[in-house]
Amino acid sequence: MKKVLLGIIASFLFLVLLLFQFNMISAREDNPLPLVSAAIKLAWNNSDIEAINGTPEKYLVKITDDIDPVITLMETRGWHFKEQMESGIVFVKQGELMTVGSRMFTNKYMIISVPRPDYPVAGKDAEIISLVAAGDILMHNTVIAAGKRGDIYNFDQFFAPVKHLIEEGDYASVDLETALAGPSSGYTGYPAFNSPDSIADALKSNGFDLVVTANNHTMDRGYQGALRTLDVLRQAGLDTSGTYKTAEEKKNFLIKDIRGVKVGFLTYSYGTNGIALPSDKPYFFNSLDRDKVMTDITALRPHVDLVVLILHWGVEYSPYPTEQQRKLAISFFQQGADVIFGSHPHVIQPMEVMQINGQDKFVIYSMGNFMGNQIGVERNSGVILNLRFTKSLPDGPTVLTRVSSTPTFIHPYYVNGQRLFRVVPIEETMKAIKEGQDPYLGEDSLPLLQQVLDTTNQTLNHSLQ
């Protein structure tokens, strides 16, 4: 009986605390209960948006730095964000405009009102997916040494600071510029890379799904080394693209069905640093040949909602793509590709959204270095891309509805005399430094990080018109 009484008292005190926390809500509405209920759900579910029972259709939204919860809600219904005009958030769907009203309610919440009260709250007429991509991983000697733990290697700490960003995507890709040919020929960095197998486990455990194997270092340990690389990556549970063990493998395009949205991936590289490819295995390596890419796009397009190209191309260390690259991008988009993720230059290059045949097509010419140890701030900078697509169900178009980019930096540091590396999200890291929460960086690092952040954003958004 005593336990029951204590439970009742505890529940009562909890309710009083909640009502006290939301007292501003109860003071502002004739019927505060739906609002208090929505606020309690926000706290209990740790969510950003909750429905307010009743009509017209309203939602209570936590005040944050953006309107992502509202955009996500509307995208599930096939509405795509267009612009924000004061208190109105404008969406478009098949040529029709809708303005969602918003108003500040307290210092913690705002209320949004969705027009057309007969619009169904339950149900779903669209599916949203997101694709994440990162740039090049270069396993230099110093990077390999940073993973050594006695007799084994572990590279998980490299990517731990950005794991949450990788896992935000439904499917995440990265370019691995090293062979995994085993220890017999030694682990070495540039110019002929060969790394411990455990890098594959680190990529998988930190959220990656696809590893691109077509790049200029594919043949660093010869054909047999390249085959073993495929085996190691696949045994770790990773998809691979760009190199193939059999002709049958190459014919079967990599297609991922993500909640009913079919995404096809095609990957190519300009070459292999002059190392000859096996002449009797023309299927092995996807060379970046314009006509071949166009043919593959044509073959893949009828089977998918999205075609993603991952291209190893461009001029090393140049901050801009060549005119030929832009022409190729336009040709590939006109042929039916939707996205191009570029790699190889080892520095960040611009991204742009092109309007092709009335549709938005996205290209980033180079995502920079995701991991490595080159000289120069710009060569230790990268970006994690997150592209959001909305498919109108059941068989409507799939369109690009959001592009977000997170600038990153490869940070070297020391623990017990060992030089280690980690890739950090710059803005989050700067915030942690200011709050005294970063374990390795102090406020003296802020000017450098700000410089990298500013340079990255300026480059990404540099107009190529």
Image (tube, grey):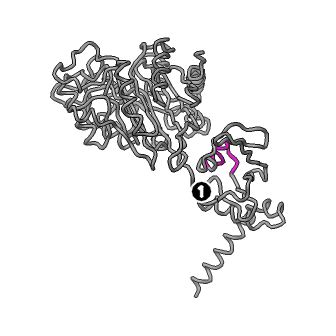
In this picture, which residue range is highlighted in magenta?
Answer: 62-72
Residue 160 vs residue 102: left or right? left
Residue at horizontal 79 percent and vertical 39 percent from the top: 86
Residue 203 vs residue 230: left or right? right
Give whichever of 183, 42 is nearer the camera: 42
Residue at horizontal 34 percent and vertical 34 percent from the top: 211
The quadrant of the image that shows the C terminus is: top right
Give whichever of 352, 40 is nearer the camera: 352
How many residues crowd mark 1 within 10 Å: few (<14), some (14–19), many (20+)? few
Q: Position of residue 238 (x, y in %)?
A: 32, 40
Badge 1 amino acid: Asn
Which residue carries the number 1 mark? 46
Q: Is residue 419 above or below residue 163?
A: above
Residue 303 vs residue 124: left or right? left
Residue at horizontal 74 percent and vertical 51 percent from the top: 110
Secondary structure under the numbered disc 1 in the rendered image: loop
